[in-house]
Amino acid sequence: MTGAPEVQSRARQALVETVALRREVAARGRTIYRRWRPRIGRSWFAPSALNLADYLAIRRHDLRPLQRRLMALGISSLGRLEGRVLAQLDAVAVALAALADDRTGTPRPPSERQFFRGETRLFSHATEMFGPAGHGRSGRIMVTLGTEAADDPAVIADLARRGAEIMRINCAHDGPKQWARMVENTRNAVTECGERPRILMDIAGPKVRTAYVLTPQDRSRVFTGDTVLLSREVQPPMPDTPFQMTCTAPEVLDRIGPGDRVSIDDGKLHGVIIGAANGGFLVRIERGKLGGVKLRSEKGLNFPTADLGLDPLTDKDRADLDFIVVHADLVGHSFVQTAEHVAALQAELARRSNDWRRLGLVGKIETPRAVRNLPEIIVQAAGQQPFAVMIARGDLAVEMGFERVAEMQEEIMWLCEAAHVPVIWATQVLEDLVQDGLPSRGEMTDAAMAGRAECVLLNKGPNVGLAVDTLNRLLSRMGEHQIKKTPTLRALHAWDERNTGPA
């Protein structure tokens, strides 16, 4: 056949590279896995941890040159191997061996069951965490409850009937009396697939906020170019620095210094520390809204480049855990940044319940440090109890910069898929619809992308029921087109000459 020798030569070259890559990935993956093995108390997670180790090993390589050679030969480009690293490499090697007419040293072809085993595990882990999804979709819908859900049982019943499978209680708000009524109302509700909704309770964590603020009489808005004094105590008014603020955790001033970045009011203002002054630091504002931002108390303060050394479990969190272990199905761990943080929370749970491993754990990934330590966090958490990752895009944007959020959410999803760990897509999903009754075009696209996660979180608001309806329909439709990164290639009829409308 004309051209066959050239194809065989190219396939043989790619085969040699693929087999060598497979050998190296397997060896390095085993090394990583052996380091993790003592943390894995649940044997069913061991294969997932090994695949995660293999994924970390293969992502040390730049696969783009090999990908292009494979694509030109009509073979998988390795772009969808997250859940099945070695099986994907084996399948590619077998296909290349057939093209090269050289089966020397090639692995056995994986069976279809072996090839899709990671997908099956992820589905099983998601069901264990969240329960079954609504009819016609694979992703679940979670809703944050407001205080009204404690007083009116119909609020939660309506959300469940519309399609919400998980109700989220934020322990930063309300208290045990309101939480108990929310729990009771949730237990009495039924989802559209006949299950009772599950309950996630988020511990608040050590959120640093502005405390006392001082602004000049002639204006209250801070603009780009202004300087703000951040100190332990408010100083007498100073002409050169008319804007001042203290913070709710003054001990963080011992962990920051010149050059560190500062974000005020959850990212509305961004600045850098330019020097020390009056027992605190001067922060020059480098970026903010053109119309300025009012400096207010009780607004979020973030220090993206500093390790603040804060314990992610506050005294309030420990008190709230007494309620959570009795009433919740899932506990949300705010500001978790290391495997040691996870272990500390698990020790607190164990002190409160002999059956603590039945409680699902949600790790909220909110900082660059948490992203860097995500593999270790996953192994410590999922090695002991059901686990999911929440991509807290709001805090990530503040900590890492808005430009990097899209990139980071993709990388987090890939890593979780490699570990067969379900993901919760969070922060401002359909926010305009929830608050104002009409979605923007951009947030509809964002919500469609959220269908690649196993769960999507909606915030509380006056139109959250309408948002649940919309998301329910959207996830059902998008589920027909895509599973994680993989297009399903169902038949399209929008351009069928026999039809006049989109389908």
Image: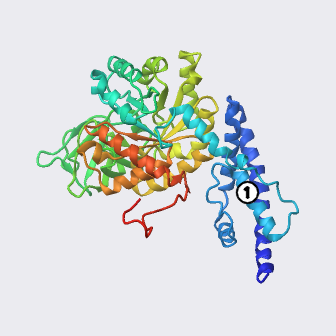
- Decide if residue 65 is in sight here: yes
Give the residue type that dot 1 points to: Leu
Residue that sits furthest to the left in the current view: 218
Q: Residue at x 23, y 54 (%)?
A: 223
In front here: 240 or 115?
A: 115
Residue 444 percent location from the top left of the image: 36, 53
Which quadrant of the rendered structure holds the C terminus?
A: bottom left
Which quadrant of the rendered structure holds the N terminus?
A: bottom right
Task: Tell me: residue 373, above or below residue 95.
Answer: above
In front here: 502 or 382?
A: 502
Task: Tell me: residue 107, above or below residue 147.
Answer: below
Q: Residue at x 29, y 42 (%)?
A: 434
- Report the side of 73 relative to 193 (left or right): right
According to the picture, the residue beneath numbered tag 1 turns out to be 89
Task: Tell me: residue 160, above or below residue 286.
Answer: above
In front here: 480 or 460?
A: 480
